[in-house]
Amino acid sequence: MDAVPLPTAGALHPIPQPGAARHALLRLVTAVLDGVDEREVLWGAMAAIAATGPFVAEAAYAVHHGLARRCSPGRAGASASAVAFGGPGSAVALGPNPTDRGPAVDRTGREPAVDRTGSEPAAGPRGEGGAEATAAEVMAADRLDRRIDALDGRSRNLHEPGGRWSRAIALRYRGDCLGYLVVRSPTTPSPEETALTDLLAQQTANALARLTGRRAEPPGAGSASLPGIADPEGNGHVPPTTGPGATVSALASRLAVHDALSRAAASGGGETGVLQALHDHTGFAARTEDRFGNPRAQAGPAPGPAPGPAPGPAPDEPRGGPGDAPRPRDRRRESLLRDARRRPGAVRDGDRLLVPVEMAGDLLGAVALVDPDRRATETDLSALGQAALVLAPLLSYERRLAELEPQLRHGLVDRLISGEATDDDFAQAAALGHDLRRPYRVAVLEWPGTAGRAALGDAVARAAGRLRLDVLVGSRGAATVVLVAGEDRRDPAGELYGAVSDVLGTGAGAIGVGGRCDVFTDLPHSYDEAVRALTVRRRSQDPYGSTGFEELGLRRMMGTGGGEREADRFVREWLGRLLDYDSRHRTELVMTLSRYLESGCSYDATSETLLIHRSTVRYRLQRIREITGHDLGSVETRLNLHIATRIRNVLDTPP
């Protein structure tokens, strides 16, 4: 048989061994539930918690009339531990508390006799110096007492950021706090270890409730009368009335269910795997919902619609926008969840038993059993509560990932198009599902009518899914930047523009696509090409649509550095006077000339494009001749002016 690790107080802490610790834990709980006063129950529970993980007992408190009283271990902690671990020689070394603030209560409700001069006898020697508490210990204990007084009946972490882990575990029964167990740990406990401490805290609260004589109303019909179920239409439920043996058996069953749920979560099955394990152990259909009531996942033959979007409002309910008041069904759910979070256990919502899933006070959703006939037992309710504990870190991680993933993608895209990417970005891209060793093109999108960059980014992701394109979405300034992966040398701009237009419901946008990059270090160059292609598209006769850099023809030769400076001189030579005139008089003669040349020198096409009369086109062209001195009837002159206007469209910044 495995050796049983002994929980300790002080510098040493147990090293849990799953098989032996579980058996010792059950024996210890037997002693706790058979305790004769609060001290024995509280400190027996402390020893039980120490057997579940790297926990060290700090202090125990009983709450009476809203006041927390510190309970020193005395002989109670030693006797409970001795029963659990096989004898007095195995007792847990729990030192006396320097500031015992009040006596405990036994089964009769009377306080046991204590020495009114200050404290009880010490539980055992602390060394050659005896059991005298130092001044520092007294001050630390007094500080802890004040922190416990400030709690609101809920479990709270007590450690400072970066400090040793410490927590006050509230012992709650039917909405009342009956005490606190304060434990610390040299390391942060695992979710499984903290879940086991919550189970032990619940059993300890039940034991304290029996000691203090708390009794409930007679049981009603149906599962709403079971412990741990709150029914909005009926409040009756009863506390456990079974003996210690039955309670230990129930706890063993709970540990088995918790093991199954934890294995399902650790196996990679995620949320669906946990629900399947819950269904297998209870026989009821299980489902999870988000905080708004929308189904997320399910296991078992659940009646009703499959997981999907939440149903719309009923015919008699108002249809409002985001800023309108909540619908009646929304207000009812908010009230239901608020009530469920205030009390332990499940709440009934029609044919479902529901437990909120929360992490660090943040509501993540809910897990439910479908029980229309009200056949659920207390064991089923315990499994439902444990499923909520196991699902909490899964849903919390999923939420954090959903919040961080767009930021990670945007940061990665920004580094890639800026030329600041390193080999470390390969690993980050792979974690996000992208292989940077594949060829990529950069696309830059602008949709002025879109509510924001996030909406456009979501639309691009959905459109890419329809086209089966592998894309990495980011942003730069007001534009959305997309890295499109693929071996195909064909320009994807046209297909992407059409798909994004369908998703957004409007084609009032433009896309510029750069050249293909076989290595990620060329992505900044592709981004520059995409920006130029987008600029040309926006300044063309049809500003909505897509343009690839390959389509620019002569204009694609206009790059950066010396070539751009030479091109700028060429533009100034042929269009300088006209540009200056437009700037001084706020006219659009350059735009008129560009449209006229693009249309093949057609008066009618130019007037239709600019939405002006044909005679206005004639007048503007005459003014252009007068200002520039150029003969528009000369083929050579028209060619140079046409090239100059096209170069300007490439080199000029967007308005």
Image (spheres, grey):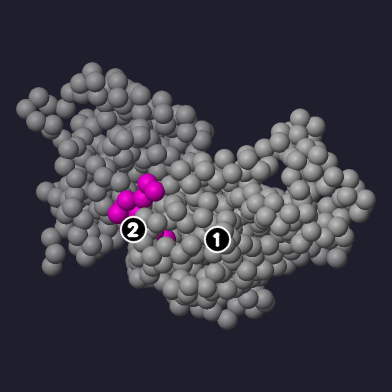
- Separation of marks 2 and 1 at Cα, in angstroms: 27 Å
Q: Residue at x 90, y 48 (%)?
A: 616
Disc number lying in front (2 or 1): 1
User: As shown in the figure, which amino acid type bears the numbered disc 1?
Assistant: Phe
Expressed as whole percent of the image width and height from the top left, the position of residue 41 reads 34, 46
Expressed as whole percent of the image width and height from the top left, the position of residue 582 reads 76, 36
Residue 549, labelled with which disc? 1
Residue 498 appears in which quarter of the rendering?
A: bottom right
Name the N-terminal-most of marks 2 and 1.
Answer: 2
Count of numbered labels shown in the rendering:
2
Whether residues under marks 2 and 1 lie with C-beta atoms below 8 angstroms apart, the answer is: no
User: As shown in the figure, which amino acid type bears the numbered disc 2?
Assistant: Phe
Q: Residue at x 12, y 26 (%)?
A: 130
SS at badge 2: helix
Expressed as whole percent of the image width and height from the top left, the position of residue 579 reads 71, 38
Residues shaded magenta: 419-435
Question: Is 424 within the magenta?
Answer: yes
Residue 306, labelled with which disc? none
Residue 285 appears in which quarter of the rendering?
A: bottom right
User: Going by the picture, which residue comes out furthest to the bottom?
Assistant: 301
Asked whether residue 435 is in view, the answer is no
Please identify the quadrant where the C terminus is shown. top right
Between 284 and 626, the one nearer to me in the picture:
626
Q: Residue at x 62, y 71 (%)?
A: 495
Read off the residue under disc 2: 426
Asked whether residue 439 is in view, the answer is yes
Q: Is residue 172 left or right of residue 294?
A: left
